[in-house]
Amino acid sequence: MIMESPVPSPESTDEDDPSTTQSEDEVRWMAELAEGSEDAFVKLYRSLSGRVFAVCMRILHDRQGAEDVCAEVFFELWRHPERYDASRSSPHTYLFLVARSRAIDRLRHYERRGIGDNSGAEMLPEFPTLDPRSHPETIANRREEKAIVQSALKGLDENQRSVLELAFFEGLSHQQIADRLDTPLGTVKTRVRQGLILLRTRLAALLSTK
Amino acid sequence: MKCEELTDLIHEHALGQLEPVRAHELQEHLATGCAVCLRALRESREAWCLLAAELEPTAPPPEMEEKLLSWIRTEKKILQERSSRDPSQLSQTSTAAVRKSRVIGLVLAASLLGVITSVATWRFLPASDRPLGGLGGPADHLTWGDPRANQSESRFTQVALEQIPQRAGVHLAVIGHPRTSEWHVFCMGLPTPVRDVTCKLWMETSAGEILSGTVLTVDTQGTASAVVKLPADISQLAGLKITVEQNAEAEEPSDQVLLRANFRQQKPAAVDVPTAR
């Protein structure tokens, strides 16, 4: 892991190859990171930190807490790139899940300590939402990918979306969701199952027509 | 269990929210290499994360990148200095380093003492009180003191850990044996007991999931010793951490972390847990 590699300057224009997809870039950078490349780490950070930070903010509603968790997640990524298993998920999914897990740990801590919910107060971004150092075509590709995801999510009905969000952003189990919504456990399981199937199939269909 | 019956469990497992017993059952099934369920798990993770992908990216403050690069370069520098240190320079080791090595020596000594105590305790226990009911007990699950694990061989091994104290003076030693499904953990430098505050040790998987928490009973000297039961599949373990908890029953670790420890190898090969149950 001791390897000096040049870090791209903020002005560099070759950070992303616009001819490749974001996932392909991420996989290549993860492989380079495993070899100790600081350059690859910076590329991954610049590519994914905005969304990892957004996940932390969405769960914690607390800017300072979200910053701590986000920094911790990326530092661990640097120290232990071998923990990523390409057969189990894409790099961004892996990072989202680790960030989610860490943020929910902190949320539980806040709840135990009776620290209030800052919902709304810190939600507006104070910083640019897309890294201006990215290639314009890359930014366009990512906007298109986001539009596809939003389109897939629109296929969910309100009940399905509600149970998925409670599980993902609040870390509730199926039973806890059933208790929270005063809904039978079987109904919650069905909504989760159907919601995830719907997301998967709509996403696959949208990507195939892209 | 049929694969189609596992769908709901897979969706909960993808988020690390399955209760431990069910998670264990599912992990055992996945460990068989079932391609259908492994694919379902991957697809479930990707589908869940669409909820995250939909969020508007919010760039963290610019200082974060600088801070991370500063941490990385500091760590690199320390590692380079360590790896390039000439043996002839050892005599010039600083007082602080000597003190640290003494502390580590004490931890190791305490570890050895604990192991000897475990064995001796077993030997003096009546057969009926022994963990497995004596030599005639079931042969599939070994615990500390089991004669088949430690009488005729000396294969106790200190589990290789990279320790990252979050509070000065906290140290940890973990002793394993290839045939036990438990580790003996020794800690020092912990906060001395205060009412309603507990120290807990947690096992962490490579996906950042927390598997279990063990209460550490800290004495007035700030030391603690505990036997930790290992999960069925230790290859998923990435490290340990010790936290301070307001509630001993806490099921999730607080963010008051005293020490993090990562396994030096991807798999803690020092311990080969028996698979038969």
Image (cartoon, rainbow, N blue to C red):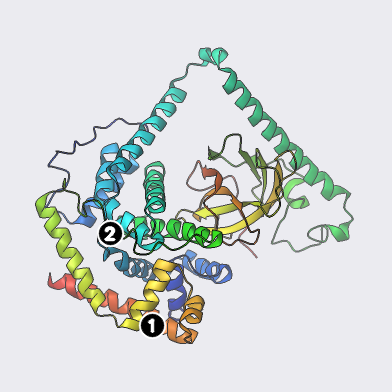
Read off the residue under disc 2: A124
Image coordinates of residue A150 in percent, x first then y, are 22, 71
Q: Position of residue A75 (x, y in %)?
A: 39, 43
Instruction: Identify the residue shown where x is 85% and y is 59%.
Output: B129
Q: Nearer the viewer, residue A32 or A7?
A: A7
When the figure is inspected, residue B188 is found, relative to residue B103, above or below; the finding is: below
The mark that comes first in sequence, 2 or 1, is 2
Q: Report the amino acid beneath label 2.
A: Leu
Q: Quadrant of the C terminus of chain A?
A: bottom left
Tag 2's secondary structure?
Answer: loop
Instruction: Please determine whether, in this image, residue B41 is positioned above or below residue B266.
Output: below
**Where's residue A88, x and y in %?**
37, 60
The answer to whether A10 appears left or right of B47 in the picture is left
Q: Is residue B14 visible?
A: no
| Circle number at residue B22 | none
Residue B217 in view, yes or no: yes
Q: CA distance from mark 2 to mark 1?
A: 30 Å
Pointer 2 indicates a residue of which chain? A
Pointer 1: what residue? A191
Residue B114, compared with residue A128, is above or below; it is: above
* Quadrant the N terminus of chain A occupies: top left
Q: Residue at x 21, y 52 (%)?
A: A128
- Please identify the quarter of the rendering in which residue B62 is found: top left
The residue closer to the viewer here, B70 or A129, is A129
Amino acid at circle 1: Arg
Q: Position of residue A140 (x, y in %)?
A: 12, 58
